[in-house]
């Protein structure tokens, strides 16, 4: 492994090839070094606070609204404002920062493309470097791609607005170290995207826009405020030039939405219902509470009381502050079978209608083939409005902590458990092979859905739960099912694909993170060790 010191402070552990020479310029590295030195110590403290908060919940405390910040929740204040090109976000598409994907997403019938360095990207060094080049070329309008058959992909006129999602605070960038430790992936992604693109973005009337994932507290949002303000000052930009949409996808954060908006009021434009991660976080946060165990993943839908309360509270909170309330992800993918595709589009229409009628300003799709369906729903509800900031939900009965924590009814079935195993193993296999966004059984799976699959089983084992057929969920039962479902996967994917893949490693990792006595926080952390 080559070690190349490019500054006094941070060390790159990869050879400097053509990709690196384009991305890791001297000025870019200087900026990254400043960010890392300035903000890593506090980031480490924030992660330690997460652990202490979780220990208190493990010992019986339940998340709640904080009485010490009631004045912020009760106060009459608004966020700074929303740029012109972000006023209409009725449909957004998300996907990894791969070249062909970036072009197709920007060309889709959507308003915004969230280019993802997080849950839908397996962050190998090469993928991260290529991702920054792809986004730079997209911003400059020079991006094109030619596939093996000679088909050329190019940007159409008037592409979607670009927003970059950086990695969460917990994720390291292991190929770059500072004081002997891997640097925060979030600062690496933020710094490089901002540095290479802010001038071109501002010159064309847009700006450096970000999605922030996995936030657990207003203090973490305040950390991002300081990162943004430091950057604006360093590059002589007006306060509020950098804009962010923050995902409410952890259970602790849903109790702090006003505080998060207030902490970031110069920079924030909205919150997003990151529902799949939110379900994962509900399991993980309440893992020691035997009365709050979720049923089969398939039955945990947005009409369940605890998820409906979350969506309604997010809309009411955001609109009171002049911020957007973005809806969640439609994970379905179109089918070539006409009847099956009709069922998919009907489900997407019902899901998006629920969001639009509730007052969300826009929604997410994972596939360009769903854009028209989602767009039709929001066009119907919005009419000639650009958003639904006028929907206040002020007449709603206040949402209580008890509603946000309400146990979810439903069965735990053998079929559901087996499906969880197959989804998680196939996703982990793809992820450690370098692909973080995978179609499995008609759904576009990313890390969040695999996390639900494996944490559900962990919790069932941990609390000695039984399935609907009366069988107790034990480590032994899981191991038996895992071995059987690996054989099902082998038959489904075919011998050649199975032999060429990393299914044995994926099964070992699945076994490790599902049967460990302590719940592993994120599968991407041990998974990252298996990634180039």
Image (cartoon, rainbow, N blue to C red):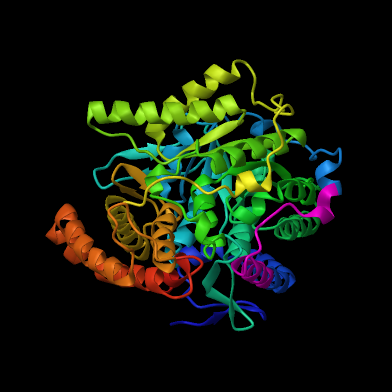
From the viewer's perspective, tell me whether residue 469 is left or right of residue 103.
Answer: left
Q: Is residue 356 above or below residue 246?
A: above
Residue 229, position in %: x, y?
78, 55
Q: Which residues are magenta?
A: 48-70
Q: Quadrant of the N terminus?
A: bottom left
Can you give x and y, in whole percent of width and height, for residue 7 in the image?
65, 77
Quarter assignment of residue 484: bottom left
SS majority, magenta: helix
Q: Is residue 532 visible?
A: no
Q: Is residue 53 magenta?
A: yes
Foreground: 379 or 59?
59
Corner quadrant of residue 430: bottom left
Look at the image and tell me in which quarter the C terminus lies: bottom left
Magenta stretch: includes residue 332: no
Q: Residue at x 43, y 61 (%)?
A: 455
Is residue 495 visible in the rendered structure shown here?
yes
Residue 26's place in the image compared with 377, above or below, is below
Please state which of residues 7 and 172 is positioned toward the viewer in this rendering: 172
Relative side of 517 to 323, left or right: left
Please tell me which residue is depicted at 68% across the width and 43% down the height of the picture: 400
Task: Please count the marks in the image.
Answer: 0
Give left or right: position of 23 versus 516. Answer: right
Instruction: Give the percent coordinates (x, y) of residue 247.
Output: 60, 48
Q: Measured from the top left, where is residue 520 in percent x and y?
A: 48, 70
| Residue 5 or residue 359, whichever sits in front | 359
């Amino acid at each position: 492994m080559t070690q190349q010191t490019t500054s006094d402070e941070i060390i790159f552990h990869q050879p400097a090839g053509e990709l690196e020479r384009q991305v890791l310029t001297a000025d870019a590295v200087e900026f990254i070094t400043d960010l890392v030195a300035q903000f890593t110590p506090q980031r480490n403290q924030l992660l330690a606070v997460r652990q202490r908060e979780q220990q208190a919940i493990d010992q019986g405390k339940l998340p709640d609204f904080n009485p010490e910040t009631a004045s912020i929740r009760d106060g009459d204040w608004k966020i700074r404002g929303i740029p012109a090109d972000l006023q209409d976000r009725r449909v957004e598409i998300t996907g990894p920062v791969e070249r062909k994907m970036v072009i197709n997403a920007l060309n889709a019938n959507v308003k915004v493309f969230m280019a993802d360095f997080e849950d839908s990207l397996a962050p190998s060094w090469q993928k991260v470097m290529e991702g920054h080049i792809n986004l730079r070329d997209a911003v400059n309008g020079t991006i094109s791609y030619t596939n093996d058959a000679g088909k050329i992909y190019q940007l159409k006129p008037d592409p979607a607005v670009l927003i970059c999602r950086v990695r969460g605070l917990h994720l390291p960038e292991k190929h770059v170290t500072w004081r002997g430790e891997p640097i925060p992936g979030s600062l690496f992604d933020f710094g490089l995207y901002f540095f290479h693109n802010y001038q071109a973005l501002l010159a064309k009337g847009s700006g450096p826009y970000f999605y922030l994932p996995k936030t657990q507290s207003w203090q973490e949002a305040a950390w991002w405020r300081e990162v943004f303000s430091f950057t604006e000052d360093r590059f002589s930009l007006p306060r509020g030039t950098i804009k962010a949409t923050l995902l409410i996808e952890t259970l602790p954060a849903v109790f702090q939405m006003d505080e998060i908006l207030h902490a970031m009021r110069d920079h924030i434009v909205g919150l997003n219902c990151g529902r799949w991660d939110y379900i994962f976080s509900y399991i993980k946060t309440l893992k020691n509470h035997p009365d709050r165990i979720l049923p089969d993943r398939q039955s945990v839908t947005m009409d369940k009381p605890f998820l409906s309360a979350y969506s309604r509270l997010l809309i009411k909170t955001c609109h009171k502050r002049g911020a957007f309330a973005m809806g969640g992800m439609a994970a379905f993918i179109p089918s070539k079978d006409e009847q099956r595709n009709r069922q998919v589009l009907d489900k997407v229409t019902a899901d998006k209608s629920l969001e639009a009628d509730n007052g969300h300003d826009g929604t997410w799709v994972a596939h360009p083939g769903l854009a028209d369906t989602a767009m039709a729903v929001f066009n119907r509800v919005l009419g000639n409005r650009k958003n639904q900031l006028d929907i206040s939900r002020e007449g709603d009965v206040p949402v209580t902590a008890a509603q946000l924590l309400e146990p979810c009814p439903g069965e735990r079935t053998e079929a559901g458990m087996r499906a969880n195993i197959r989804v998680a193993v196939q996703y982990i296999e793809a992820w450690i092979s370098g692909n973080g966004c995978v179609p499995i059984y008609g759904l576009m799976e990313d890390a969040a859905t695999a996390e639900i699959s494996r944490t559900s089983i962990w919790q069932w084992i941990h609390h000695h739960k039984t399935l609907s057929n009366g069988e107790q969920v034990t480590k032994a039962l899981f191991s038996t099912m895992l071995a059987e479902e690996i054989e099902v996967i082998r038959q489904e994917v075919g011998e050649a694909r199975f032999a060429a893949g990393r299914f044995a490693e994926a099964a070992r990792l699945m076994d490790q993170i599902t049967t460990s006595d302590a719940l592993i926080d994120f599968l991407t952390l041990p998974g990252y060790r298996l990634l180039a």
